[in-house]
Image (spheres, grey):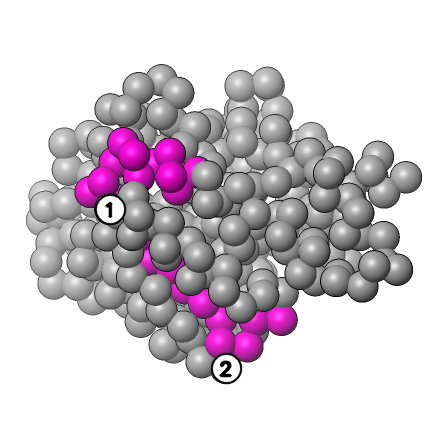
């Protein structure tokens, strides 16, 4: 039964209760002056998805010399609206940049999450991420836009795998992508299950041979590194991560070094698994990285 219902164990869009009925307006006061707008998107298999697009109020568009767009992939639980105040804090800090840049975050609601239709699976979410990357590249001016991909927890796997998947249609598809942020990442889902449930009497670890969702970040980074050595990578660890075992971020850093990707690994002291972008130090690392691109 666990094999059949494994996606219900891995993907938890209704945790905590009522997550799928969250409203953007309920968080608007905490986000100001950042404004979040719902966008409709359709994946290649026809699944209707929701994006949230947030920007600070632009001064004058003619004053903008460059646009940096950050694509955000969330973790495996809850929905996007409760994350918006923290994403807005990042945008507000980026907006202080005097260099004539405009910053935007585009956040994907995976299928089965929040207002998106369908049900979550790795195969489906890969289609969602592909549609999001294509939408962003088509929406923003190619000549003056840099794109950063940022994923948290399982979203770090989504971010890495989605970039690797772009290579199926040619190496030039990564040309506009400047940075990759891996927040509390893991090497792959199989290792997480074994690490979290080492006891042989617990059944979860025995799912690993049958997993349909692997989110193999290590393999994805190797594929990306082989074709895009100029991509910069930021790896963020939570100092008190209660989900991802020690050593996962260090392993991924080693992969980046092997593939000659420019990588920086930072640890946020005292942060739990979902608290890296809540903590001031975590926000500092993200803002400095994006500004450096």
Label annotation for residue 270: 2
Q: How many marks?
A: 2
Q: Residue at x 42, y 54 (%)?
A: 252
Q: Which residues are magenta?
A: 220-242
Residue 136 image point, x, y percent: 35, 33
172 sits left or right of 125 in the view: left
Dot 2: what SS?
loop
Residue 71 image point, x, y percent: 39, 44
- Against 279, residue 18 (above or below) is above
Nearer the camera: disc 2 or disc 1: 1
54 sits left or right of 175 in the view: right
Residue 12 image point, x, y percent: 71, 50
- Which residue is more in the foreground, 8 or 206? 206
Dot 1: what SS?
loop
Q: Quarter of the image containing the N terminus?
A: top right
Q: Residues within 10 Å of mark 2 (few under 14, many from 20)?
A: few
Q: Earlier in the sequence, mark 2 or mark 1?
A: 1
- Which residue is more in the foreground, 91 or 173? 173
Q: Residues within 10 Å of mark 1 (few under 14, many from 20)?
A: some
Q: Which residue is mark 1?
A: 260
- Which residue is more in the foreground, 178 or 197? 197
């Amino acid at each position: 039964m666990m094999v059949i219902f494994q996606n219900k164990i891995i993907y938890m869009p209704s945790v905590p209760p009522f997550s799928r009925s969250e409203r953007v307006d309920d968080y608007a006061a905490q986000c100001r002056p950042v404004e979040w707008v719902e966008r409709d998107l359709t994946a290649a298999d026809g699944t209707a998805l929701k994006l949230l697009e947030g920007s600070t109020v632009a001064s004058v568009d003619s004053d903008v010399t460059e646009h940096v767009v950050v694509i955000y992939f969330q973790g495996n639980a809850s929905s996007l609206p409760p994350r918006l105040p923290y994403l807005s804090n990042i945008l507000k800090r980026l907006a202080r940049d005097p260099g004539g840049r405009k910053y935007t975050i585009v956040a994907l609601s995976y299928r089965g999450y929040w207002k998106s239709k369908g049900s979550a699976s790795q195969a489906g979410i890969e289609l969602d991420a592909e549609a999001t990357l294509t939408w962003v590249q088509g929406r923003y001016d190619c000549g003056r836009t840099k794109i950063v991909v940022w994923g948290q927890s399982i979203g770090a796997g989504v971010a890495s795998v989605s970039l690797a998947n772009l290579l199926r249609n040619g190496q030039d598809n990564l040309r506009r992508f400047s940075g990759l942020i891996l927040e509390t990442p893991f090497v792959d889902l199989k290792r997480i299950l074994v690490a979290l449930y080492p006891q042989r009497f617990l059944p979860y670890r025995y799912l690993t041979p049958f997993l349909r969702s692997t989110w193999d970040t290590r393999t994805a980074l190797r594929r990306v590194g082989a074709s895009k050595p100029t991509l910069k990578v930021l790896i963020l660890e939570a100092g008190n991560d209660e989900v991802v075992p020690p050593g996962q971020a260090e392993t991924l850093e080693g992969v980046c070094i092997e593939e000659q990707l420019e990588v920086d690994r930072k640890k946020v002291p005292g942060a739990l698994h979902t608290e890296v972008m809540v903590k001031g130090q975590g926000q500092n690392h993200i803002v400095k990285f994006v500004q450096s691109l």
